[in-house]
Amino acid sequence: MMQLGVIDIGGTSIKYGVVDGHGTIIRHTSIPTEASKGGRAVVEKVYRICDQLMEEQDLPGIAISSAGQIDSVKGVVVFATDNIPGYSGTPLAELVANHTGLPVTVENDVNCTALGEYWQGAAKGFNHFLCVTIGTGIGGALVLDGKLYTGANFSAGEIGHINLYPNGKPCTCGNCGCYEKYASSSALSELVQHEFGAEMPLIHFFELAKAGEAKAVTLFKHWVEDVTTGLQSLVHIFNPELIVIGGGISAQGDFLRDAIQSSLDKKIMPNHRKSLQIKLAQHDNKANLLGAARHFLSRYEGEDKAFTDDTRR
């Protein structure tokens, strides 16, 4: 059974491991990204990870998931924020291929979440779905008619920067009122701090909300309304059959899923509501490793048809 080396480059940690051709994660671990040291330092860490993986076993290739807007054909970081300084323009696939002598693919991290959940997770069997990751910001990926849609310049799915409140809070993208400034987990943390007068871990906040504490319930409902106002527009544009919610906040399970489903159902037109499901990502932060492997297999084994067929079994 073929086994691929898989790497997921995030702003906080770099996860890596081995995935086989059936979508089983053989092993995985992580190290800090130390993103503030810049893109070149991140690439050096990836080299060391590849060396370690290659020492442990014979690998046919390296599959990478990465933060940033990624040209998934050439494996280039088209654009990345200053969370990883100097990362924009990095020819990541070429650099890693030259270092390892192996075929290398690179795809955007949220796209990899979608691919991983489509292959072996919550989206298995669905050919029209949105993947929304709620974390420090909000990321998005679109699977339309069974294929990942990346747009004209590999930048589709930047749903965190749709406008929710014109002339609202300034965003790191340079605009104001962006979705992620109101509906991300970091936005919720800011609301909690303002309302309760002190920093509070979100896990504790959710415990209060689940227990029915009045302020927490009111705040949670307000935040969910912002989440679903953004989703409302996406549903009306794309008419998906499924929305997969990923990111650390998905750990809240049915409490979160049910609140989003109930709020969204009230905002969308009947024909859009008829078949729409909300699911939470099954593989949490490991979906990116699976998705990176799936992207590699589709590229190097010509398995686009097999990919679609596998999801229907």
Image (cartoon, helix red, strand yellow):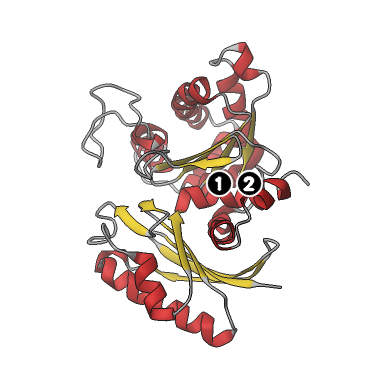
Q: Residue at x 23, y 60 (%)?
A: 85
Q: Is residue 78 left or right of residue 14?
A: left
Quarter of the image where one finds residue 75: bottom left
Position in image of residue 153 (x %, y %): 34, 43
Quarter of the image where one finds residue 170: top left
Q: Nearer the viewer, residue 142 or 225?
A: 142
Q: Secondary structure at mark 1?
A: helix
Q: Residue at x 32, y 31 (%)?
A: 178
Quarter of the image where one finds residue 143: top right
Furthest residue toward top: 270
Looking at the rendered structure, the kind of residue marked 2 is: Tyr
Q: Is residue 50 left or right of residue 119?
A: left
Report which residue position mark 1 lands on.
114
Image quadrant containing the N terminus: bottom right
- Real-space Cα separation, disc 1 to disc 2, in angstroms: 6 Å
Tell whether label 2 touches label 1 (CB within 8 Å).
yes
Q: Residues within 10 Å of mark 1 (few under 14, many from 20)?
A: many
Figure check: 42 above or below 268:
below
Q: Residues within 10 Å of mark 2 (few under 14, many from 20)?
A: many
Report which residue position mark 2 lands on.
118
Furthest residue toward bottom: 55
Q: Residue at x 46, y 68 (%)?
A: 104
Q: Is residue 30 left or right of residue 154?
A: right
Q: Nearer the viewer, residue 301 or 175?
A: 301
Furthest residue toward right: 313
Q: Secondary structure at mark 2?
A: helix
Position in image of residue 166 (x %, y %): 27, 21
Q: Nearer the viewer, residue 54 or 61?
A: 61
Position in image of residue 106 (x %, y %): 44, 60
